[in-house]
Image: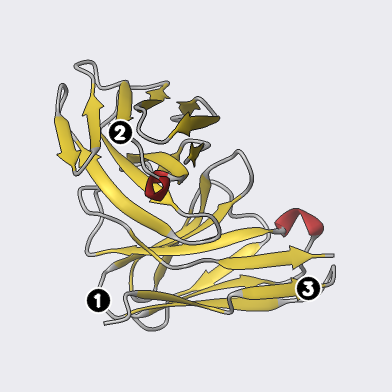
């Protein structure tokens, strides 16, 4: 079965600093979702990537899928307290998810 | 337009008790899913449905049953709850399958089995 590994599992970043989360697949990805989950709440869709080398941005968040379609990165520029939460990558169509990365932003 | 709603939000069960979690969506989506989320393990697919009257097993179906009698509702049942089923349960829906559509998630149900 396809497994997704996220790294790091958690990170603390000073407000205003950049951060990067990685998601690595054991198999070639057909496509990948990125979601954000606020503590104790549901999942909020961030982005979906399907093509090798594809990069998408929304506000201060950029996600990229590598050419081989086995690794994706999520980058947040100039982090803010509103970026705190758990970030999850998910593969489709198999609908498997990584273990999540817990982000804490220190003001 | 409420999106995806889940009932109840919290529940405590004793081992061996049964219960049903209700998921409802008002977006006329064909596909619906049930996941469980455990610490450090992300989301794992329990069961899913590709349309009214159809269901299929996901990654971790044991101990759960589902039904999709109406297009807008997807029920998750626990016949005899076990402590290992303590988790947060999320329901999601998509217009169709294939993965090229955003999954819309409900707010979750936190279940504790003692």
As helix, strand or loop, the secondary structure at mark 3 comes to: strand
Q: Position of residue B29 (x, y in %)?
A: 26, 71
Residue A55: quarter of image: top left
Crowding near the residue tagged with mark 3, few <14, some 14–19, many ≥20 C-alpha atoms within 10 Å: some
Q: Which residue is mark 1?
A: B27
**A22 and A32: which is toward the camera:** A22
Q: Are marks 2 and 1 on the same chain?
A: no
Q: Tell me how far mark 2 sits from mark 1, CA to CA.
A: 35 Å
Check the image and report above or below for B45 versus B76.
above
Q: x%, y% of residue B86?
A: 72, 59
The chain to which mark 3 is attached is B
In the rendered image, the residue lying farthest to the front is A107
Give the side of residue B6 with respect to residue B3, left or right.
right
Lower sequence index among marks 3 and 1: 3
Q: Chain of mark 2?
A: A
For mark 3, what is the residue?
B13
In whole angstroms, how far apart are the C-alphas of marks 3 and 1? Answer: 31 Å
Residue under circle 2?
A78
């Amino acid at each position: 079965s396809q497994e997704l590994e996220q790294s790091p599992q958690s990170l603390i970043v000073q407000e205003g600093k950049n951060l990067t989360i990685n998601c690595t697949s054991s198999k070639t990805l057909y496509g990948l979702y990125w979601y954000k989950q606020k503590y104790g709440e549901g999942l909020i869709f961030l982005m979906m990537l399907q093509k090798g080398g594809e990069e998408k941005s929304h506000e201060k968040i950029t996600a990229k899928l590598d050419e081989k379609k086995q690794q994706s990165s999520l980058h947040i520029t100039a982090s803010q307290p509103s970026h705190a939460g758990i970030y999850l990558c998910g593969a489709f169509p198999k609908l498997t998810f990584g273990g999540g990365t817990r982000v804490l932003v220190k003001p | 337009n409420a999106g995806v709603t889940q009932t109840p939000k919290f529940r405590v069960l004793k081992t061996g008790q049964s219960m049903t979690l209700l998921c409802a969506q008002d977006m006329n989506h064909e596909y619906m899913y049930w996941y469980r989320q455990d610490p450090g393990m992300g989301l794992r697919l329990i069961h899913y449905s590709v349309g009214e009257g159809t269901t299929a097993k996901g990654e971790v179906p044991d101990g759960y049953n589902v039904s999709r009698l109406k297009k807008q509702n997807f029920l998750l049942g626990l016949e005899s709850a076990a402590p290992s089923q303590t988790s947060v349960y999320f329901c999601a829906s998509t217009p169709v399958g294939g993965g090229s559509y955003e999954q819309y998630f409900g707010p979750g149900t936190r279940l504790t089995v003692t």
